[in-house]
């Protein structure tokens, strides 16, 4: 794996990683992490497929090693991705998005369909209605004491580092289907994915609401590359039925993995790996 800083047209420098090899007649894969406001965490997913093709990852501007201050917009992040493709020398790639990264991949597809050879969406995008079901599932997975503590920390104007780790763990452990390991997985993420760029999170979530993908499903279907797939977990707090419904609307396959959560490579690595490798082998063929 090679780490490289790439400078964009406004001077922002994004941290990127490249693994695998460029294979003749196989398109590279570019991974788009979620958040928004956390750095890349998709190295374990890249490791599942980097023997099949070239794989790129990056920290979105304002996160991790991509230090930057300014207003975040969907258009700016779409442009960032297009400029990264230019810097890597790729006309067309297979996009792999996770969580919010599936939304960003969707906006990129709308803006640059000619550059998307394939699309693999993991745990998203969740299009309305889904939020009430997600909140209800989260609440059911927390004890009364955990919920009260989360509410207390959420209302705090400032949190110590230890409190921030506790807050993120309480927020994230409901993502996982395996309840015996959910806390440890969330705690590990809380310790490694800080600091959270909360301004970025608020701005990009507001941008999603201002231009919702729900209103552009017809456009997405028209631009969708052949073989596009959605992969989700039946044990995600977010309703798997929303992914099935989107798959039907787009006319693409939705693979829902039993006993997997929002990060299916953790809960069900074998089933997830098989589904992902099949999708990559099918979609990277140029």
Image: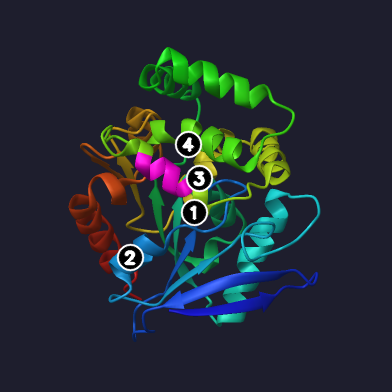
Rendered location of residue 31, percent (x, y): 47, 62
The kind of secondary structure the magenta stretch mainly shows is helix
Dot 1: few (<14), some (14–19), or many (≥20) neighbours within 10 Å?
some
What residue would you read off at disc 2? 283
What residue would you read off at disc 1? 223
Q: Which picture quadrant has residue 245?
A: top left
Rendered location of residue 3, percent (x, y): 53, 78
Q: Which picture quadrant has residue 62?
A: bottom right
**Element marked by disc 2:** helix
Given contact means CB atoms under 8 Å apart, are the residues at marks 2 and 4 in contact? Answer: no
What residue would you read off at disc 4? 169
What residue would you read off at disc 3? 190
In screen coordinates, is 105 left or right of 205? left
Please tell me whether mark 1 or mark 4 is closer to you in this view.
Answer: 4
Q: Which quadrant, please, contains the C terminus?
A: bottom left
- The span picked out in magenta is 184-190
């Amino acid at each position: 794996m090679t780490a490289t800083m790439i400078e964009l047209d406004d001077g922002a420098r994004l941290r990127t990683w490249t693994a695998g090899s460029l294979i003749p007649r196989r398109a590279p894969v570019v991974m788009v992490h979620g958040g928004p406001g956390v750095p890349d965490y998709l190295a374990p997913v890249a490791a599942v497929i980097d023997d099949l093709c070239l794989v790129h990852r990056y920290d979105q501007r304002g996160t991790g090693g991509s230090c930057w201050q300014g207003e975040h917009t969907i258009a700016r992040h779409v442009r960032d991705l297009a400029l990264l493709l230019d810097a890597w020398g790729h006309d067309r790639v297979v996009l792999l998005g996770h969580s919010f990264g599936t939304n960003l991949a969707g906006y990129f597809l709308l803006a640059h369909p000619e550059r998307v050879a394939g699309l693999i969406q993991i745990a998203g995008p969740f299009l309305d209605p889904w939020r009430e079901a997600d909140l209800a599932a989260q609440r059911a997975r927390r004890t009364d004491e955990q919920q009260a503590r989360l509410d207390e920390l959420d209302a705090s104007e400032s949190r110590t580092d230890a409190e921030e780790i506790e807050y993120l763990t309480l927020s994230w452990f409901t993502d996982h289907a395996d309840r015996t390991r959910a806390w440890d997985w969330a705690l590990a993420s809380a310790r490694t994915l800080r600091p959270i760029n909360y301004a970025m999170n608020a701005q990009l979530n507001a941008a999603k609401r201002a231009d919702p993908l729900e209103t552009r499903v017809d456009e997405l279907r028209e631009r969708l590359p052949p073989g596009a797939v959605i992969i989700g977990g039946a044990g995600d707090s977010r309703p798997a039925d929303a992914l099935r419904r989107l798959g039907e609307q787009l006319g693409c396959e939705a693979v829902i993995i039993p006993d997997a959560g929002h990060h299916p490579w953790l809960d069900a690595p074998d089933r997830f790996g098989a589904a992902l490798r099949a999708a990559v082998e099918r979609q990277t063929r140029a």
